[in-house]
Image (cartoon, coloured by chain):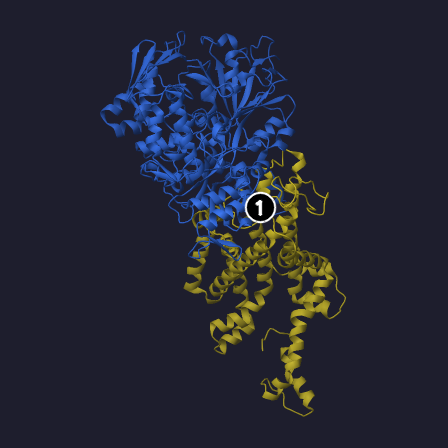
């Protein structure tokens, strides 16, 4: 629209140009937002892991999946809800969607949460796991048992069995899911029980976060069992077949099934044989296609849709939405940080990293981006803000907060000067006279991140670093820039994302050993796939006397199997200390996920502050429990 | 002496009068004559290059407005950037509405950047792009067009086929690919890149102009006298093409403005320099200016900047056409009563777009 305005009064060629540009916008958006992790089909296992790891990033960074709003006219319906439809949004072209989660290409995002049932509902507000498709579980040291919900059926009438769940989890084992590192075998021990056997004893929390949370029941044995056999016979060919399989007519395990899909919208119909169907008082669920955040803003503003599951919207924009929309914010356990390349001449120097962290005024960054949906991590450590008090609250005297709401330039100067850096003509130079450059590589089109980078570049420049920013396409970053260490410093998520990111083992593992986004950041303690060799790190001792040398990788392995609280605490604090002192990644802000739902118009929602709003995403979860209802 | 100049042939007789001696009329110069006419030649040059164009230009509102506008941008890009502070985040309060404070007369963005400062500091790079793109496009087009048109034959066929091929490449996608591959950050390089195949169409029209010019008697005379091709092109052909070239220079410049803004808006060109397109992009994406009505000013001001420079270039192109049109010029400069509408009808110069 706005492009067109600036082309007013120009000849035909310019009009053609404009049209072309408009088309390019959609093309770019599709590529940027949707296919982010989709273009790398030459697989090996490692690549696959990187791909699946990168998956969460998209929606979290403000490139939300979007929905659409066709049937406004038909939106109404009888008071009993028959004929009623809930209109939501997706940012992927519905006609192209497929639901094989092992195939990253055009993989459905939000609709899969409607079509398939989740294993359990993890509530980020209460920290509790609530059984769902997996109704119960038990941990037995080196085993873990899952019990499948009894009355659950697939869309075609078959019962959901332990065999189905085991098939899906075994495929994960073959494709390098996060639990693959410590799992020996997964078997269906009877019709409703799936048993994990671990390589060694494991603490209670880890399998819960790793196996139960954020998983959906989607790979039915009758459809996906063949891939397991194929992988047994020929791993490479089998993996290739699995990851290339486009599951475009999925067999639903959830309360909705696909009725139709076209370029504009995906229409789902309620399944009456789902055990929770009785809680749902509307018949149709529509996901309309919107290509970018701005078109969703517009749709919300015009009340064209009933919900948007995850959408970054700055305060000014939120204000323009009609009042009947409720904004549900949930901690993302994820957020903007800087990932230095530890092999880089300057970024590899702890003093420079600390100086950068000191100079960054995190509060200012957060206020510049959106104080309403971002928060300042109190301490730069590998633990999410909301859990810092719980884990390191007793040691905050020792931990450095690097000036959360100020640019601690004096401290930065001190650190740099102690390390042999000096200021020359307003620029910081090292002992050889080389100017310290901080070229920050960031994904283009991630609005909130771009604002943050801009602010940081200005903060660093005014301190005397030669800071700059360079935007690259997200696909280019995940395909080449990050895996090839082709950066001095880049923006990146410093946490693991919900739900794993909430538990320190995972967030520390992400920062220190094996980040889930595929940054080859060459940190010495990191895994070889991330450019390290799982080596030692030496940091000042926490009690202030001398130094201590720690092997983060070994300590994390110990943390994984620890079961007594004292050991878990000790190791967590120790590793948090390493992240605080050595700064493998530089935390800057943490995000709140934003969902928008019509709560006062045609729909009724629980009151704000209700615990059930802590389960993501409210527009696909709450209808199942009867909390989101059509009221006409 | 260029045979095209209307007063060229009179000079020998002026010389005769000045010396007060009776002389046989001759087409040849003597050294004295050259020495004597130094001042006059300067004067004549002044007349030709400045005085007459200025008269014609000043009679035409379009040229005056366009010129003033463009001069304004030149000032902004040279003096403006020196006196007005560069945009940085948090230089003023966040999200100030326009026309409320002198600190940020046109308001500020959500990260506290002064909008006016962003507009001013995007100007120098834009001007550099304009000049680089304009010179590159018209330069190549002139070279190719004149050589092809004048030489004819096999050379003509080869060059024409080449420019046809260049013309058939879709320009914008090509630019996009090149921009992604080379990630140009220097505005001069960007300017050249944006006009990478703009010259082709222009080259063809210049060729057609040359085809008519080469049949002119004075060109034929030069050819008969054995003057070499390059000299004929330089002395006889190109000067006559200048109006056409300059008008198209202004059009090429406008093309550079729009294309650069479009590509910056799309995020295809790297954010290495300030640009109004980047401002539009940020206003649309980061501030949701189309949804949040209160932020509309973030879109409007850079748009005004873009429209202003485009308007100045369009007006200049039209005005320049008149300046270079010999009939209009002579009439106006000679203070003969002339009717602007008449003059317009006599326009001989063709616009590319």
Q: Which element carries disc 1, helix, strand or loop?
A: helix
- Judge whether B311 appears above or below B153 on screen: above
Q: Is residue A105 left or right of residue B69?
A: left
Q: Which chain has been coloured blue in this picture?
A: A
Kindly identify the residue that appears in the image at 56 percent across and 14 percent down: A628
- Judge whether A511 appears above or below A69 on screen: below
- Asked if residue B32 can be seen in this view, the reply is yes
Residue A534 sits in quarter = top left
Q: Position of residue A340 (x, y in %)?
A: 43, 42
Q: Which residue is mark 1?
A: B277
Q: Label 1: few (<14), some or many (≥20) within 10 Å? A: many
- Judge whether A59 appears above or below A586 on screen: above
Q: Which chain has been coloured yellow in this picture?
A: B
Task: Point out the residue furthest to the front here.
Answer: A545
Q: Nearer the viewer, residue B106 or A496?
A: A496
Q: Is residue A144 left or right of residue B199?
A: left
């Amino acid at each position: 629209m706005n492009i067109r305005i600036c082309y007013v009064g120009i000849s035909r060629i310019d009009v053609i140009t404009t049209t072309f540009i408009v088309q390019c916008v959609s093309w770019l958006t599709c590529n940027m937002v949707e296919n982010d992790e989709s273009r790398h089909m030459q697989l090996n296992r490692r690549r696959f892991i990187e791909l699946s790891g990168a998956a969460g990033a998209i929606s979290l960074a403000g490139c939300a999946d979007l929905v659409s709003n066709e049937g406004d006219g038909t939106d109404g319906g009888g008071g009993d809800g028959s004929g009623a439809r809930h209109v939501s949004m997706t940012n992927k072209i519905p006609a192209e969607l497929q639901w094989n989660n092992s195939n990253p290409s055009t993989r459905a995002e939000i609709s899969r949460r409607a079509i398939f049932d989740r294993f359990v509902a993890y509530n980020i507000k209460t920290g509790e796991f609530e059984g769902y498709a997996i109704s119960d579980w038990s941990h037995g040291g080196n085993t873990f048992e899952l019990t499948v919900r009894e009355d659950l059926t697939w869309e075609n009438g078959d019962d959901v069995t332990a065999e189905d769940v085991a098939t899906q989890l075994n495929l994960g084992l073959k494709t390098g899911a996060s639990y693959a590192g410590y799992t020996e075998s997964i078997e269906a021990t009877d019709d409703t029980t799936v048993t994990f056997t671990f390589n060694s004893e494991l603490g209670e929390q880890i399998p819960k976060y790793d196996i139960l949370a954020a998983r959906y029941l989607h790979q039915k044995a009758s459809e996906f069992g063949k891939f397991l056999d194929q992988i047994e016979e020929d791993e490479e060919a089998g993996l290739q077949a699995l990851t290339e399989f486009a599951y475009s007519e999925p067999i639903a395990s959830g309360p909705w099934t696909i009725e139709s899909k076209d370029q504009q919208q995906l229409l789902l119909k309620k399944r009456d044989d789902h055990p929770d169907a009785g809680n749902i008082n509307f018949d149709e669920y529509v996901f309309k296609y919107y290509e970018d955040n701005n078109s969703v803003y517009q749709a919300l503003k015009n009340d064209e849709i009933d919900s948007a599951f995850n959408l970054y919207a700055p305060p000014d924009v939120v204000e323009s939405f009609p009042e009947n929309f409720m904004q549900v914010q949930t901690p993302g356990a994820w957020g903007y940080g800087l990932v230095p390349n530890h092999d880089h001449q300057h970024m590899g120097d702890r003093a420079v990293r600390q100086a950068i962290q000191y100079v960054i005024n995190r509060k200012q960054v957060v206020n510049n981006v959106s104080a309403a949906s971002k928060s300042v991590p109190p301490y730069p450590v590998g633990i999410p803000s909301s859990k810092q008090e719980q884990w390191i609250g007793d040691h905050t005297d020792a931990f450095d907060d690097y000036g959360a709401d100020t640019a601690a330039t004096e401290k930065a100067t001190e650190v740099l000067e102690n390390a042999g850096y000096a200021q020359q003509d307003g620029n910081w130079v090292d002992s050889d006279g080389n100017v310290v450059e901080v070229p920050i590589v960031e994904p283009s089109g991630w609005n909130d991140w771009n604002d943050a980078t801009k602010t940081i570049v200005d903060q660093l420049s005014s301190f005397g670093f030669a800071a700059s920013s360079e935007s690259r396409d997200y696909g280019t970053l995940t395909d080449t820039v990050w895996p090839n260490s082709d950066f001095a410093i880049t923006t990146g998520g410093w946490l693991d994302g919900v739900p794993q990111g909430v538990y320190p083992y995972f967030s520390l593992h992400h920062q220190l050993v094996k980040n889930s986004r595929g940054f080859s950041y060459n940190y010495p303690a990191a895994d070889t796939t991330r450019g390290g060799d799982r080596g030692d790190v030496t940091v000042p001792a926490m009690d202030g006397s001398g130094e201590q040398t720690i092997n983060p990788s070994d300590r994390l392995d110990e943390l994984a199997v620890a079961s007594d609280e004292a050991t878990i605490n000790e190791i967590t604090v120790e590793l948090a200390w390493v992240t605080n002192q050595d700064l493998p990644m530089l935390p800057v802000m943490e995000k709140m996920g934003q969902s928008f739902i019509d709560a006062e118009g045609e729909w009724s929602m629980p009151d704000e502050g209700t615990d059930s709003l802590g389960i993501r995403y409210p527009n696909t979860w709450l209808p199942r429990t009867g909390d989101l209802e059509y009221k006409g | 002496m260029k045979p095209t100049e209307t007063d060229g042939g009179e000079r020998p007789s002026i010389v005769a009068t000045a010396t007060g001696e009776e002389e046989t009329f001759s087409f040849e110069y003597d050294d004295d004559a050259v020495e004597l006419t130094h001042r006059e030649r300067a004067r004549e040059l002044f007349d030709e290059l400045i005085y007459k164009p200025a008269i014609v230009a000043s009679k035409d509102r379009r040229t005056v407005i366009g010129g003033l506008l463009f001069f304004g941008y030149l000032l902004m890009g040279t003096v403006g950037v020196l006196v007005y502070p560069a945009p940085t985040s948090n230089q003023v309060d966040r999200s100030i509405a326009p026309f409320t404070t002198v600190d940020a007369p046109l308001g500020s963005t959500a990260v506290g950047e002064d909008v006016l400062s962003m507009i001013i500091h995007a100007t120098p790079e834009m001007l550099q792009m304009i000049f680089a793109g304009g010179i590159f496009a018209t330069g190549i087009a002139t070279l190719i067009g004149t050589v092809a048109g004048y030489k004819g034959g096999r050379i003509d066929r080869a060059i024409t086929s080449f420019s046809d091929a260049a013309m058939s490449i879709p320009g914008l996608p090509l630019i996009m690919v090149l921009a992604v591959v080379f990630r140009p950050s220097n505005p001069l390089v960007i300017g050249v890149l944006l006009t990478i195949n703009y010259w082709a169409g222009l080259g063809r029209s210049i060729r057609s102009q040359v085809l008519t010019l080469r049949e002119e008697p004075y060109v034929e005379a030069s050819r008969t006298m054995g003057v070499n091709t390059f000299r004929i092109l330089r002395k006889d052909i190109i000067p006559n093409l200048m109006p056409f070239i300059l008008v198209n220079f202004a059009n090429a410049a406008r093309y550079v403005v729009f294309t650069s803004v479009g590509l910056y808006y799309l995020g295809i060109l790297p954010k290495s320099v300030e640009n109004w397109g980047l401002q539009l992009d940020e206003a649309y994406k980061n501030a949701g200016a189309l949804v949040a009505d209160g932020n509309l000013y973030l879109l409007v001001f850079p748009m005004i900047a873009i429209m202003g420079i485009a308007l100045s270039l369009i007006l200049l192109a039209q005005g320049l056409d008149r300046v270079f049109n010999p009939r209009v010029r002579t009439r106006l400069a000679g203070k003969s009563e002339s009717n602007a509408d008449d003059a317009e009808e006599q326009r001989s110069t063709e616009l590319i777009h």
